[in-house]
Image (cartoon, helix red, strand yellow):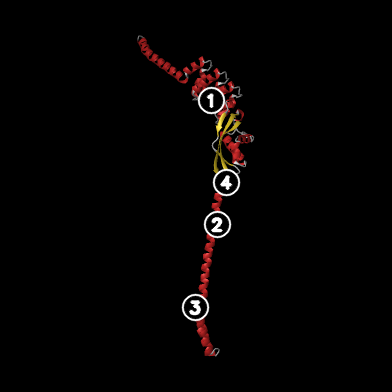
């Protein structure tokens, strides 16, 4: 019995050590799962956040700061948002801070924008904050140099500034800036191409913007075109003259090819005629070689006399003499 108190005294330090270790582990676990500093910041900012929500975010691997700070910002701006909605949007891959900023700007500018629409625009890959800002402050889009040719063949180079305002209701599924630029470029090319002379375009460049605006180029886009201003108009190349020169060069090459073809045909005909002449000469020589045989046969058969033969020889001699004199 005397040994019992001594045993208890030996066990007590070990028990105290285990308790201390457990307390330390619990404290570290609490501070690991609960961002106390963030919770205190939210509390003093007037945002009620349960510790269980913070622990749940930690377990779901959600950075609590990405949710709490935008929530504080929204609360201060009197924008009603649920913490669960923000966390759901974060888990869906959205930009929570951008969405909250867009809602605040929309509220200040009296633009109707719900949280659902803002998150849908954000998840669609568009910058919802920029869209709201462009809806409040119109944006100017500079087109690249657009080359068009008037009816007289002179090239006109145009640079335009397109002022647009974002339409929140058409952001989802609406075409972007590239479509606006392409349509404006097409309208400028068509308008300049219908002008009889390039001087008409230079004298009245506003006619281009007026004509292009009437085409309704913002149909199906996420923007509303407010104005199209012609920033610069320059004269380019004389396309008509260049085309004529190219056509003349092409005609020249065709004529040269045809002349070469005719020359080749003439050479071929000449060679053919030479071959025919040689053939005829060969036939003449062959015929001449038969003459002595024919004369001998005529002598044998009595068809020709010696007098007639001599007369024939004199005739041939006279013919050769006349040919030599003519040469």
74 or 162, nearer to the observer: 162
| Tag of residue 55 | none
Q: CA distance from mark 4 to mark 2?
A: 22 Å
Of 283 and 37, the residue lying toward us: 283
Q: Are marks 3 and 2 in contact (CB under 8 Å)?
A: no
Question: Considering only order in the chain, which callout, 3 or 4, is on the residue closer to the N terminus?
Answer: 4
Residue placed under numbered mark 1 in the picture: 98
Residue 105 visible: yes
Earlier residue among tags 1 and 2:
1
Q: Earlier in the sequence, mark 4 or mark 2?
A: 4
SS label for mark 1: helix
Q: Quadrant of the N terminus?
A: top left
Label 3 to label 2, Cα distance in Å?
47 Å
Q: Which quadrant would residue 3 be assigned to in this image? A: top left
The answer to which of 22 and 12 lies nearer the viewer is 22
Pointer 1 with pointer 4, Cβ within 8 A: no
Q: Badge 3: few (under 14), some or many (20 or more) residues near its Cα, within 10 Å?
A: few
Q: Which residue is mark 2?
A: 255
Question: How many other residues sit within 10 Å of disc 4, few (<14), some (14-19) or many (≥20)?
Answer: some
Of circles 1 and 2, the one toward us is 2
- Residue plotted at (56% across, 42% down): 155
Outermost residue on the right side: it is: 214
Element under label 3? helix
Circle 3 is placed at which residue position?
A: 325
Nearer mark to the viewer, of 1 and 4: 4
Image: 317 above or below 58: below
SS type, badge 2: helix
On the image, numbered disc 4 is attached to which residue?
Answer: 240
In percent of width and height, residue 6 lies at: 35, 11
Q: State the image coordinates of residue 186 (x, y, percent, origin top left).
A: 59, 39
- Sequence-first tag of 3 and 1: 1
């Amino acid at each position: 019995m005397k040994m019992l108190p001594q045993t208890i005294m030996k066990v007590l330090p070990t028990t105290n050590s285990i308790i201390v270790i457990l307390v330390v582990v619990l404290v570290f676990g609490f501070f690991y799962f609960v961002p106390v500093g963030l919770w205190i910041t939210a509390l003093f900012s007037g945002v009620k956040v349960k510790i269980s929500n913070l622990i749940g975010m930690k377990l779901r691997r959600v950075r609590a700061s990405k949710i709490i700070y935008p929530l504080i910002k929204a609360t201060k701006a009197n924008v009603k948002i649920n913490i669960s909605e923000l966390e759901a949007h974060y888990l869906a891959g959205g930009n929570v801070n951008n969405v909250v900023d867009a809602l605040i700007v929309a509220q200040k500018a009296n633009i109707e924008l719900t949280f659902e629409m803002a998150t849908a625009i954000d998840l669609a890959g568009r910058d919802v904050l920029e869209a709201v800002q462009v809806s409040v402050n119109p944006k100017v889009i500079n087109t690249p140099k657009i080359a068009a040719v008037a009816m007289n063949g002179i090239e006109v180079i145009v640079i335009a500034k397109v002022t647009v305002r974002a339409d929140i209701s058409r952001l989802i599924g609406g075409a972007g800036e590239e479509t606006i630029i392409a349509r404006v470029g097409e309208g400028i090319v068509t308008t300049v191409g219908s002008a009889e002379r390039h001087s008409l375009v230079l004298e009245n460049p506003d006619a281009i913007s007026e004509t292009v605006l009437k085409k309704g180029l913002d149909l199906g886009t996420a923007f509303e075109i407010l104005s199209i201003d012609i920033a610069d108009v320059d004269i380019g190349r004389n396309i008509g003259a260049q085309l004529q020169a190219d056509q003349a060069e092409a005609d020249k090459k065709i004529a040269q090819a045809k002349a070469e073809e005719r020359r080749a045909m003439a050479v071929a005909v000449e060679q053919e005629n030479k071959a025919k002449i040689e053939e005829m000469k060969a036939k003449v020589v062959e015929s001449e070689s038969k003459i002595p045989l024919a004369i001998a046969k005529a002598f044998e058969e009595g068809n020709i006399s010696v007098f007639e033969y001599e007369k024939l020889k004199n005739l041939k001699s006279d013919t050769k003499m006349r040919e030599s004199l003519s040469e």
